[in-house]
Image: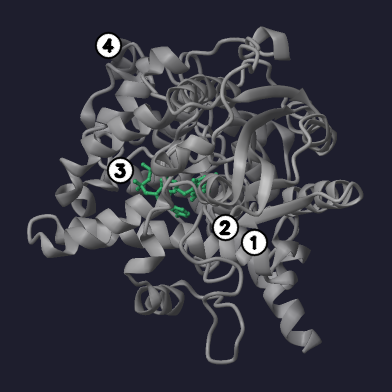
Amino acid sequence: MKRYDRALVWFRRDLRAEDHAALSHALAEAREVYCIFVFDTEILDALERKDDRRVEFIWHSLVELKSTLRRLGGDLHVLHGRARSEVPDFARSHDVQAVYVNHDYEPIAIARDHDVAERLAAEQRVLHSFKDQVIFEKSEILNAQDSPYVVFTPYKRAWLARVGRRDSEPHPVADRAQALSPGNAPPLPDLEDIGFARTNLTNLGIPAGESGARLLFEDFLGRVSAYAERRDYPAMVGPSLLSVHLRFGTISIRELVRTAIALDADAGARAGAAVWLSELIWREFYFSILFNFPHVAGSAFRSEYDALKFENRESHFHSWCNAATGYPLVDAAMRQLNSSGYMHNRLRMLSASFLVKDLHVDWRWGERYFAQCLNDFDLAANNGGWQWCASTGCDAQPYFRIFNPVTQSRRFDPEGRFIRMQMPELAGVPEKYIHEPWKMPLDIQRSSGCLIGETYPAPVVDHAVSRKKSLAIYSAVRSQSRSRR
Ligand SMILES: Cc1cc2nc3c(=O)[nH]c(=O)nc-3n(C[C@H](O)[C@H](O)[C@H](O)COP(=O)(O)OP(=O)(O)OC[C@H]3O[C@@H](n4cnc5c(N)ncnc54)[C@H](O)[C@@H]3O)c2cc1C
């Protein structure tokens, strides 16, 4: 006996028709299930660029999702408007009794869902919400004092001790699909219809949708054994490149975790899979931090660091955004971000540290810039990453540990392969100078086609001087907060 005659699944950051908690529950509990996605103008209107790769990624993923749902006997209605009114309006016009969604943990989304639930309730409809994006959420992993962990290693230990086979079991869809409501949804609006334009996403070879995620995952499984050794070198294909798929839910976290745990039995892949699983757990750690300490969206996790006196020079920020700091690996990182919407993890750490601790620009400026540019932008991971680099976060890099941009470059891009890939203006620079091109004698500058101050900028700051200044900025706050105690 089913609970409802008609239900509605509202897709958000879960754009797949496989192993989907809300869809699976709706199909089990309702006789007829509609599926919708809303291009939410509250989100879209805030995007600065109309050629935003994320909107195109979503669009391609929806084209595929619609066709998959149609194959299963259902369809996808794609709407454009304010989700908080579009969803209740659709529920009313299709006379559904319940709306099914997966939990979203971002403060703005929580408020929106609360609002939608109230509007539905006013008409005797209900909103059911499920855990889907993570293995453990909210308060599921707590320490001995029943508080959320604020240090990663014990969190990870507790996570690993708790995870069992059931936590990563799939939520079935295909064998319940007969409840999907058939056809009749209008075609998807074009990107232009919703005010957006095509980007270079397809040329970049970033595949969207469930099929794109599968392609990347299968490719990664062939090289997971080398993950631990390769993942820090941006010129190598080391990481999985799945972050944008995890962001938009075109692959299930349960499948990834299940696979990573199963690889423990494979001696060849074990070490790589364990390190990779650790990264997936970092993702959950930051979700838990954002959910339990929502003040981090906008403020330092450790509030004493809100008193940091950053210089915030516009010209410095501008040079960082535009890959013109004069430090080749930092600039190559920013070029990668600007041209593709992706940045390698090692480079996210380096470029964030450089902005805050060399250029003395508020970490929130960098966080905002990443939020505009990253295809995989996720509030929890981005905020966690920035606060880690700025030493303002939980379990962060100690403030006195400051990446040296030249040493990092020598270590992680020793021959300058990544630098040359991203920065054609440095392609002819000899290996000896690739990490510090400003040290090139003039004749070598001429012969290599790289004139410092003309075709490539001189360093905007001296790292040694900046480092000292940074230590002073952080020490001032620390002594202030000590004297207050
Ligand atoms: C300043 C800064 C900002 C960042 N902003 C984001 C962001 O907006 N969105 C985002 O998904 N990741 C962010 N990260 C984390 C990390 O850099 C990316 O997840 C990773 O580079 C994505 O590449 P991948 O999918 O190939 O990762 P893999 O190495 O294959 O890792 C697998 C998955 O684990 C997760 N993951 C890996 N590292 C981290 C981490 N440190 N924190 C949280 N999750 C992690 C991601 O979902 C990733 O897809 C940020 C890191 C820093 C230092």
Q: Is residue 8 left or right of residue 221?
A: right
- Of 208 and 446, nearer the camera is 208
Task: Give the secondary structure at mark 3.
Answer: loop
Confirm whether residue 26 shows in the render.
yes
Label 4 SS: helix
Label 4 sits on what residue type? Ser
Mark 1 vs 2: CB contact within 8 A? yes
Q: Quadrant of the N terminus?
A: bottom right
Relative depth, front residue between 88 and 329? 88
Residue 31 in percent (x, y) is at: 60, 42
Q: What is the CA distance from the residue labelled 4 to the residue labelled 1?
A: 52 Å
Q: Which residue is mark 3?
A: 239
Residue ranking furthest to the front: 1
Quarter of the image holding residue 320? top right
Q: In screen coordinates, is 419 left or right of 394?
A: left
Q: Which mark is residue 447?
A: 4
Residue visible at 32% across and 59% down in the picture: 277
How is the model colour-coded?
one colour
- Residue at the spot of label 2: 384
Q: Nearer the viewer, residue 398 or 191?
A: 191
Q: CA distance from mark 2 to mark 4?
A: 44 Å
Badge 1 marks a residue whose secondary structure is: helix
Residue of label 1: 290
What distance separates the C-alpha of mark 1 from that of mark 2?
8 Å
Q: Earlier in the sequence, mark 3 or mark 1?
A: 3
Image quarter in which the C terminus is found = bottom right
Give above or below for 7 relative to 272: above
- Whether residue 217 sits left or right of residue 358 in the image: it is left
Give the Cα separation between the discs numbered 3 and 4. 36 Å
| Quadrant in the rendering for residue 199 | top right
Q: Name the amino acid, label 3.
A: Pro
